[in-house]
Amino acid sequence: MKNLFVGLMTAVMVTACSPAEQQSSDTSNQAGTDFSLDYEYYQLDNGLNVILHRDDSDPIVAAATIIHVGSSREETGRTGFAHLFEHMAFNDSENVPRGANRQMIEELGGSRNGGTWSDGTIYYEVVPKDAIEKLMWIDSDRFGYMINTVTESALEREKQVVKNEKRQRVDNQPYGHTGAIIRRALYPAGHPYSWTVIGELEDLQAATLADVREFYDRYYGPSNATLVIAGDIDIEETKALVETWFGEIPAGQDISDLAPMPVSLDESKRLSHLDNFARLPELRITIPTVEEYHPDSYALEALAQLLADGKRAPLYRHVVEEDGLAPGVRASQNSSELAGEFSIAVRGNAGVALDDVSASIDRALADFEQNGFDDRDLERIKAGLETSFYQGVSSVLNKAFQLATYAEYAGDPGYFQTDIQRIQAVTREDVLRVYNTYVKDANAIYTSVVPKAAPELVLAGSVDAGIVEEAIVAGAEPTFDDSEADYERTVTVHDRSEPPLGPMPEIKTPVVSDNLAENGVRLLNIESNELPLFNFELYIPGGVWLEDDSDYGVNALTASLMNEGTAMRTPAELEDDIGLLGSSLSINSSMDGIILRGSGLARNFEDTLAIASEMLQSPRFEQADFDRLKQQTLTRIQASETSPMSIASRAAFATLYPADFRAATPTVGTSETVGNLELADVQAFYQQAIRPNNAAFSVAGALDSERVQRAFNSQFGSWTAAADTSDQSNGQSEAPVAAATELPNWVFVDLPDAKQSVLFMAAQGPSSYSSDEYDLDVAINRLGGGSSAQLFQTLRIQLGYTYGAYATVYGGRYNGPALAYSSVRANVTSEAMEVFQGLIEGYDAQFSEADLATTQNILIKSQTRAYESLGQKTGMLSEMARYNRTSDYVSARQNRVANMSTDRVSELLNQYLPQDKLLYVIVGDKATQYDTLVEQLGEPRELDRWGQPVE
């Protein structure tokens, strides 16, 4: 869970105190900041660790429960139980209505989820504060009173869902099996990390009710868990509620923590897999190291960044720049509770032999051994620590996560002090020592995963990893009865009936300052002083709509190249100067424009903005950088052939929109159009696109409006409109509306041996300039707006066909599509398609006043948590900037939701989603699915992976 160096850790500064002695803390950050966090940390009589933190910045409450059981507590032949149980726990419990775990939190205006990893399981929610007691009722019932509701049918249903998750995330994805290959090779048989978290399908299918009960009785006790409640709470009232709802749960068995179990390798192993979905060769080198919180783990994390991240990093210089073998390289130290792994990963360009990649890595490591590293790079890494710290406490849920993590795994929610001190203490000598101790000449696991048709790219000396692909057979999955079963209810002292809601919280939208800079750029600012941070976005409209059909992709390539140094700074110098401020800056592209994004400490806002201005107005544009980024783009285009959902999306857009309409072609371009681009094309596009006309600067953070205006005018005052005013709009108007196309019965794309089929619906929708765009999104909320909506509830919860199913409105400057989508197991493609199509086409007829009331409640109350973080605040400003919205657009939308009628919903559905305007796309294995689908749906239009007709 800890990984401060790469920004994955969410961190809090607290003072250590024992849960046995109910104590409070209120301390300032020892790392040179003035941020403080108060909390109470105590233990119930049943052993449950409880942490309470008050934060009244927003009227919301977050809860996180970590149970100290992950896949490491399983046994050979009984793998996947921890993850399966996480799924089971979201289903039924004794005193909460069936399905409420997934439905009710959303319908209360909240969000919820869970996760399992090697060392633990977490359940978490965020709700408006009026639902705090309902939240405790649901959480406590799931934790202490759900096992009696688990029936054979319920178990079978969730087995199907978990297997669908594995197919979607592992079997149907390129490189999906790599983690399993590494674990089996790195850890000896029986080691708790020698199997994956999701487990083996045969183990899951063999699981019995008795197995599940035994697992629950052993690990799901309060004495093996930590509960955090954070947000707008009264501490004493919350303590009473925790005692009421959680205090009666039996303590459960005493579970001792496992001692670290690091491993070593007597020799290196080379393993290979011919991947049905991969289009590029990948080499990973994995070396055993140390567990979480080990003193050497901090220096190993620094080492990983020094080797791979940054323009001076030896792996980047050799593999990417000098040898041109790959678009990027990654290195990481992953420390877990029992052991750790240091890894280097390279996904090469098409056709690159992994022997060449391995040799390049060897040269890079030899370079490091001889020349070491520049001290500025270690300083840059440490400089980002303060920013990462604050970003890690930017929401009440993040605070809850980290308090729970430190309490459960370090034994102290205040362990952050030790953690940050150890990172700050890392020296050059520490980095070189851990390199020599763990990495230099180390035995390692080498995994070669290459396209199935290119075995010649495998690293020499490799042996087949022995991955056995699942056979998808029609009718092979057991059926289950979805009806509710009778079960024995536990007698409790406290009445566990559903509690009422509290008073409705006041919903406030942030106050926006809306001004114009001296050069006409719109300046939007939300002042937020909770944390000393800023987050900004400079949006320059135009995007792909400024491209010619001969240079599709130049918008994206231009944005990428603008990150490669300036006229005054080399790429390495630019990286140093940004990093030493503890800031981040990047220029990215979107369909509708180019965006310069930045974040950092408020005290460094002006210095960061000065560098941002230089990046925007004085890009370096070197031929060597252009050639490298062009090759990276071509490599990524080829890699995108492997994503089933991306394939479905491309087919839908290519069919739904006319061939000469820009949205019919991917925003990144095609191999042909990008292949034809030259540096001169980028330079010309830059001159055309990077203008202040209708641009907007959105910033949220500890900055007042006057300071924002002063800094922007100072740094961007010379950025003025070009003398040629032939296109002063810079593309900031609604794009031409695409004409309707003649739709086929449906579209099919063959993905041989696919374990899942993608079901995809698309129809031309409204532009984001139209109020219809938001209204339509409201109208289809009960169709696919989350886990409480019809697609998810039917296809996953009732039928077990999928891991998820959703619907949304794409929006944008043009008439972007309304979409619905799901990935279903291949052997129920036909049955799932019938249900999918039926739900969509029957939605209007069955939409009720109750559905409307639920939608209104969800969308109105979810506003309590919509603008908590700086990112969310900047997103609100970005919406204003991109579509010329006024500062009251949020409240205006709330009024539209409150006044929505079923007649208005029906009007929208009939306008945008009538049956004759719906396009259905299926991506799957033609050999096993096509004939049945043709019988069901008629003849399709067959397309290739790029949305082009199959000859």
Image (cartoon, grey):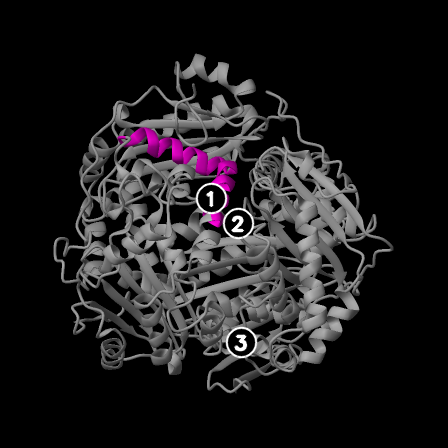
Residue 44 appearing in the image? no
| Residue range of the region highlighted in magenta in the rendering | 631-658
In front: label 3 or label 1: 1
Task: Give the labeled residue for mark 1.
Answer: 634
Q: Of discs 2 and 3, which sits in the foreground?
A: 3
Q: Tell me the residue at 78%/41% (across/down).
A: 77
Reply yes or no: does residue 942 show up in magenta.
Answer: no
Residue 812 higher or lower than 236, as above or below: above
Assess whether residue 640 is covered by the magenta stretch: yes
| Real-space Cα separation, disc 2 to disc 3, in angstroms | 53 Å
**Amino acid at the residue labelled 2:** Asn
How crowded is the residue under tag 3: few (<14 C-alpha within 10 Å), some, or many (20+)?
A: some
| Amino acid type indicated by mark 3 | Arg
Q: Which residue is mark 3?
A: 380
Query: How far is mark 3 from mark 1, CA to CA?
Result: 31 Å
Cα separation, mark 2 vs mark 1, equals 55 Å
Residue 95: which numbered mark, if any? 2
Q: 695 or 889, which lies in front?
A: 695
Q: Mark 1: which amino acid?
A: Leu
Residue drawn at x 28%, y 53% as measured from the top left: 685
Earlier in the chain: of badge 2 and badge 3, it is: 2
10 Å crowding of disc 2: few (<14), some (14-19), many (20+): some
Measuring 44% from the left and 44% from the top, which residue is drawn there?
A: 787
